[in-house]
């Protein structure tokens, strides 16, 4: 996946610069120069096509939640507003995350890493099943993940294949043994990596192109 591009919308110049630094410190993310108004946010989204917008509620020319409603882009709300009404409005209008200012750098970093994994699960143009949708939401909101959740039948089959292998196994071999397509196997394997159930490593073949190979973690029963 290419770097995920982030636009920060905040009229406090110093806070905006701080949040730019937070974003740029997370591998796989890069921040555009921030903008400080609702009108500038709309123009920047249309021109730059960011993957993610971090938008404040209190803007000089508009309420950020009103701007959010018209943006066809993933968004986090970042605001000093701590009332439940603002949080509910933000979620109703499409916010994937709500961060109350001031927040620590590591909290934003954690949310950005979760967002990157969420984007990998729901890759552009691919077909998904209900299990993949549920996994995407668990990744985006890790606090909702219950301990010891039951795994789906296909997940268990993928894990069983890896348990029987003495060496790391490519997705194509897993797909053949489980009886699913390679793309479907890859989605399940990526999800299990994100869940911490299996590990992945790169192997270089004769063509020079790297191949992902998967193995069961020793602490997974």
Image (cartoon, rainbow, N blue to C red):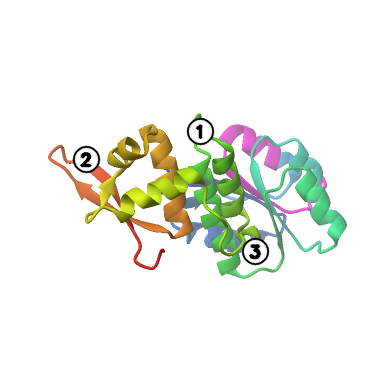
55 left or right of 219?
right
Report helix, strand or loop for mark 3. helix
Q: Quadrant of the C terminus?
A: bottom left
Q: Which residues are magenta?
A: 41-64
Which badge, 3 or 1, comes first in the chain's sequence? 3
Provide the residue designation for mark 1: 124
Provide the residue designation for mark 3: 14
Q: Is residue 15 visible?
A: yes
The alpha-carbon separation of the residues under discs 3 and 1 comes to 35 Å
Report helix, strand or loop for mark 1. loop
Q: Quadrant of the N terminus?
A: top left
The alpha-carbon separation of the residues under discs 2 and 1 comes to 23 Å
How busy is the neighbourhood of tag 3: few (under 14 within 10 Å), some, or many (20 plus)? few
Q: Is residue 132 above or below residue 31?
A: above
Residue 24 placed where, x, y %? Answer: 49, 57
Q: Is residue 130 above or below residue 189?
A: above
Provide the residue designation for mark 2: 209
């Amino acid at each position: 996946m290419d770097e995920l591009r982030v636009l920060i919308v905040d009229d406090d110049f110093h806070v905006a610069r701080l949040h730019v630094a937070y974003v740029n410190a997370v591998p796989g993310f890069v921040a555009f120069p921030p903008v400080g108004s609702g009108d500038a946010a709309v123009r920047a989204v249309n021109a730059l096509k960011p993957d993610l917008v971090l938008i404040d509620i209190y803007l000089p020319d508009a309420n950020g939640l009103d701007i959010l409603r018209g943006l066809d882009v993933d968004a986090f709300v970042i605001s000093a507003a701590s009332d439940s009404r603002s949080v509910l409005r933000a979620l109703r209008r499409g916010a994937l995350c709500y961060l109350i200012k001031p927040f620590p750098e590591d909290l934003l970093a954690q949310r950005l890493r979760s967002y990157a994994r969420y984007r990998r699960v729901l890759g552009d143009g691919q077909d998904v099943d209900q299990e993949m949708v549920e996994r995407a939401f668990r990744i985006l909101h890790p606090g909702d993940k219950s301990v010891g959740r039951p795994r789906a039948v296909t997940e268990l089959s993928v894990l069983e294949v890896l348990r029987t292998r003495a060496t790391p196994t490519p997705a194509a071999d897993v797909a053949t043994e489980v009886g699913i397509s390679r793309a479907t196997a890859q989605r399940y394997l990526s999800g299990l990596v994100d869940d911490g159930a299996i590990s992945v490593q790169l192997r270089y073949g004769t063509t020079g192109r790297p191949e992902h190979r998967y193995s069961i973690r020793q602490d997974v029963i």
